[in-house]
Amino acid sequence: MTDTARTDALRAAIRDVPDYPKPGILFKDITPLLADGARLRDAVAALQERAAALRPDAIVAIESRGFILGAALADRMGLGFVPVRKKGKLPWRRVERSYDLEYGTDTVEMHEDGLRAGQRALVVDDVIATGGTARAAGELVRALGADLAGYLFLIELSFLNGRSRLGTDEVRSIIVY
């Protein structure tokens, strides 16, 4: 299967849910893709191909759907997995970063021993929208002294321009809307 054919098949497995989580939003639901073993395998293979050139030592993934893809990618690449969670969800000593939302702020955390200084970490999530959560995760990587290998997403909502919030760091996506 060509890369274009695989991307088209992945795109076809993503369900549009209008007005979720609020009116005017068209939510890209990846659960049908996750439920299809062949499509899930294809998605992880596509992520691995884009991740390989970035030479990560660890996969840092953002909850919750990012965990699914990030853990599968880490396993396939033989790398460790480091979760980034909403504030108050991790049990050990943490570092945290806050980021702006449309109305207010939110905070994500990572265990302070999740990465070592100099380790190359790749931030993975299912979707990049406005880029705030991804940027905060990248800041957590750097706060621990690790090197940010880049960002990798299954879906990029390019009309929200989230990529611009990630500065000059490498950003790779499989499907772009």
Image: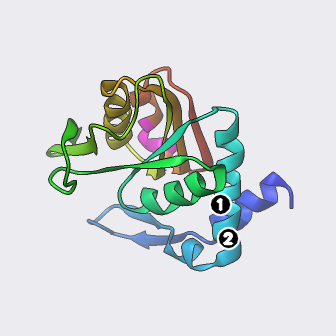
Residue 160 magenta-highlighted: yes
Residue bearing the label numbered 2: 39
Coordinates of residue 28 in the picture (x, y in percent): 47, 64
Q: Is residue 81 depicted above or below 72 in this figure?
A: above
Q: How many marks?
A: 2
Quadrant of the image occupied by residue 173: top right
Cα separation between marks 1 and 2: 6 Å
In magenta stretch: residue 156: no
Give the color scheme: rainbow, by chain, secondary structure or one colour.
Answer: rainbow
Say which of 157 and 90 sits in front: 90
Tell me what residue is drawn at x 72 percent, y 67 percent. 9
Q: Secondary structure at mark 2?
A: helix
**Residue 165, numbered circle:** none
Mark 1: secondary structure: helix
Compared with 124, 138 (above or below) is above
Mark 1 highlights which residue?
43
Quadrant of the image for the N terminus?
bottom right
Residue in view at x 20 percent, y 57 percent: 89
How many C-alpha atoms fall within 10 Å of the one at disc 2: few (<14), some, or many (≥20)? many
Pick the front one: 127 or 41 = 41
Q: Main secondary structure of the magenta part?
A: helix
Q: Is residue 123 left or right of residue 138?
A: right
Q: Bin the neighbour count of mark 1 within 10 Å (Cα to Cα): few under 14, some 14-19, many 20 and up.
A: many
Query: In the image, what residue type sits under mark 1?
Result: Ala
For the residue pair 16 and 147, the one nearer the viewer reads as: 147
Between 11 and 58, the one nearer to me in the picture: 58
Which span is picked out in magenta? Answer: 158-162
Q: Is residue 90 left or right of residue 67?
A: left
Answer whether labels 1 and 2 touch (C-beta < 8 Å): yes
Residue at 65% from the left image edge and 56% from the top image edge: 76
Q: Position of residue 172 (x, y in %)?
A: 59, 38
